[in-house]
Amino acid sequence: MKFSNVLVSGAILSSAASAASTTKSIPSSCTINSSKATATAQTDLDAFSGCETLVGDLTITGDLGNAAIATVKKIEGSLKVFNATNLNTLAADALEEVTDSLILQQLTILYSASFGSLSSVDSIQLVTLPALQTFTSTLESASEIIISDTSLESIEGFSNLQTVSTFNINNNKYLTEIDSSLKNITTSLILSSNNKETEASFDDLTWANNITISAVASLSFESLKKVNASFSVLNNTIDSLDLSKLTTVGGSLSFEENNDLTSLDCKNLTTVGGALVIGNNTDLTNIDGFANVTTIAGALEVIGSFHNLDLSSLKSVKGGADIETTATNFTCSAIDKLHSNGVIEGDSYQCSVPVSSSSSSSSSSSTSASSSSTHSSTMKTSTTSGASSSSRSLTSHGAAVGSFENASFVSIFYAIAAVLVSLL
Ligand SMILES: *[C@@H]1O[C@H](CO)[C@@H](O)[C@H](O)[C@H]1NC(C)=O
Ligand SMILES: *[C@@H]1O[C@H](CO)[C@@H](O)[C@H](O)[C@H]1NC(C)=O
Ligand SMILES: *[C@@H]1O[C@H](CO)[C@@H](O)[C@H](O)[C@H]1NC(C)=O
Ligand SMILES: *[C@@H]1O[C@H](CO)[C@@H](O)[C@H](O)[C@H]1NC(C)=O
Ligand SMILES: *[C@@H]1O[C@H](CO)[C@@H](O)[C@H](O)[C@H]1NC(C)=O
Ligand SMILES: *[C@@H]1O[C@H](CO)[C@@H](O)[C@H](O)[C@H]1NC(C)=O
Ligand SMILES: *[C@@H]1O[C@H](CO)[C@@H](O)[C@H](O)[C@H]1NC(C)=O
Ligand SMILES: *[C@@H]1O[C@H](CO)[C@@H](O)[C@H](O)[C@H]1NC(C)=O
Ligand SMILES: *[C@@H]1O[C@H](CO)[C@@H](O)[C@H](O)[C@H]1NC(C)=O
Ligand SMILES: *[C@@H]1O[C@H](CO)[C@@H](O)[C@H](O)[C@H]1NC(C)=O
Ligand SMILES: *[C@@H]1O[C@H](CO)[C@@H](O)[C@H](O)[C@H]1NC(C)=O
């Protein structure tokens, strides 16, 4: 069984276009009737060797070793190559355009896919191609690009693209370089779980709807001015990030668990439309890259080991604030002032630093807006003071730490305190 019956009876070649427009004997437009055909052998594909345009959706699957589509320049429909587990190579080097999607999926030994003339597709999905080492194209226009679970070492063949809707590159274990010249990403940019050494640069990108970046070793957005929705940089090994052109993030902005990060520059950023979260970046001790931020429409959360946090332009935080550092010489006074001045509008507020032997008045904390005028350190516990000194710190004012904030710890803490009190 080679072609499906539909194709055998139908696709062999309704030649309206060639009859109307040329005197050549071969048809230039071939219609796949019922709009779908399945090819399972090269001879099935050879049936299209006279065609320049194929109208309909073509699926290639089954037991082929190599597959070539020689003369077709345009597919008015989709091309899906799927579950051909013996397929080594795929070539469609005359193909210039696929009006719908190009999908290569579940081709376990495919190592080369060549679309040397392909300049336009609607969406392109390269998914579960664990042996794929080369993919060639000259794309200028595509709406969605998804590359997942391949052996590609770099993302090439997309360098002429200026705008895409989605650019989602994940789980490509050998991918070490993503060098993109995209200018606009109208829906999402996602990089995750590729090689941990991946160096990613999007230096022409000025606008993106949302961005999520994980597991890269370097990251560059030299031109990025605006992120319309959320922007998240999570669990990377980058040591610095320069976002100095960025002025606005329409949704939440978060930098979390980037444990090599020592320098983070958002110096032109003024507005964050959601939460601003800077958390658990263990080496980020000086947070001075947010000094122009005036407005945060969500909550403010800064957790880490920073001794400096410059938010000197801040005029409005619609949510609460949670500031926690392990640096003993951080002082909460500036952020406390923002809270008492009403700049931080949300209900929950805390700023905590570790208890240090020499400082007893530099920090304050509270867990709700209503408690801002009350002494509230009894709800906080100190990792550095330890359980042995806890019955004293329960009633003391001032220094407090929030490393163990959760209810179970607090209740255990109170239980221990109660026992100690009863022993007295
Ligand atoms: C293929 O479809 C066209 C238009 O839908 C129709 O005119 C033609 O008869 C069909 N050919 C076959 C072989 O079914
Ligand atoms: C993939 O192809 C194999 C045979 O080559 C077949 O047994 C299996 O059902 C196919 N899987 C899917 C999801 O089509
Ligand atoms: C990027 O695309 C979005 C959505 O189409 C549009 O609103 C935005 O203005 C574009 N940005 C640039 C810089 O072209
Ligand atoms: C990015 O934007 C798209 C379109 O608005 C949305 O579907 C998707 O959930 C967003 N992703 C994230 C991580 O916010
Ligand atoms: C920008 O983000 C908002 C909120 O997520 C969304 O409603 C809007 O459609 C986005 N604008 C563009 C041009 O994508
Ligand atoms: C961070 O990434 C590493 C690999 O890059 C992974 O092993 C780890 O589970 C990730 N951690 C989190 C919290 O996602
Ligand atoms: C910051 O923004 C201003 C005004 O939008 C611009 O003139 C300046 O060049 C920007 N700075 C950087 C480093 O991009
Ligand atoms: C704030 O942005 C202006 C440009 O708009 C820049 O000149 C200035 O250095 C920035 N301030 C800080 C503290 O980074
Ligand atoms: C920081 O790490 C702790 C423990 O893994 C986690 O509970 C917390 O949500 C993290 N906070 C941020 C802002 O990433
Ligand atoms: C706090 O301590 C760090 C070293 O732990 C030091 O680099 C920094 O300058 C100190 N900051 C202040 C304000 O004293
Ligand atoms: C409280 O903290 C402990 C230890 O960090 C953790 O195992 C537990 O899941 C936390 N409970 C809650 C409710 O967050």
Image (cartoon, rainbow, N blue to C red):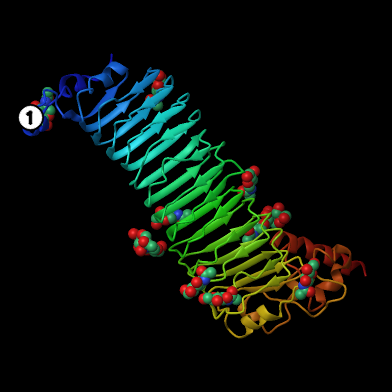
Q: What residue appears at the point 38 percent right and 48 percent down from the top-left corner?
A: 161
Q: Is residue 297 visible?
A: no
- Categorize mark 1 by other alpha carbons within 10 Å: few (<14), some (14-19), many (20+): some
Q: What residue appears at the point 61 percent right and 43 percent down from the top-left corner?
A: 196
Q: Quadrant of the N terminus?
A: top left
Q: What residue appears at the point 34 percent right and 42 percent down from the top-left corner?
A: 123
Report whether 177 appears left or right of 69. right
Counting from the top left corner in percent of width and height, residue 134 is at: 46, 32
Q: Mark 1 sits on what residue?
A: 19
Counting from the top left corner in percent of width and height, residue 177 is at: 54, 43
When the figure is inspected, residue 259 is found, relative to residue 193, above or below; the finding is: below
Q: Quadrant of residue 20?
A: top left
When the figure is inspected, residue 380 is found, relative to residue 100, above or below; the finding is: below
Q: Is residue 167 visible?
A: yes
Decide which of 137, 295 is in the foreground and name it.
137
Q: Quadrant of residue 367?
A: bottom right
Give the residue type that dot 1 points to: Ala
SS under mark 1 = helix
Name, please, the residue furthest toward the top.
1
Report whether 212 appears left or right of 209. right
Question: How many marks overall?
Answer: 1
Counting from the top left corner in percent of width and height, residue 345 is at: 55, 79
Within the displayed image, which quadrant is ligand 5 positioned in?
bottom left
Counting from the top left corner in percent of width and height, residue 124 is at: 37, 40
When the figure is inspected, residue 303 is found, relative to residue 69, above or below; the finding is: below
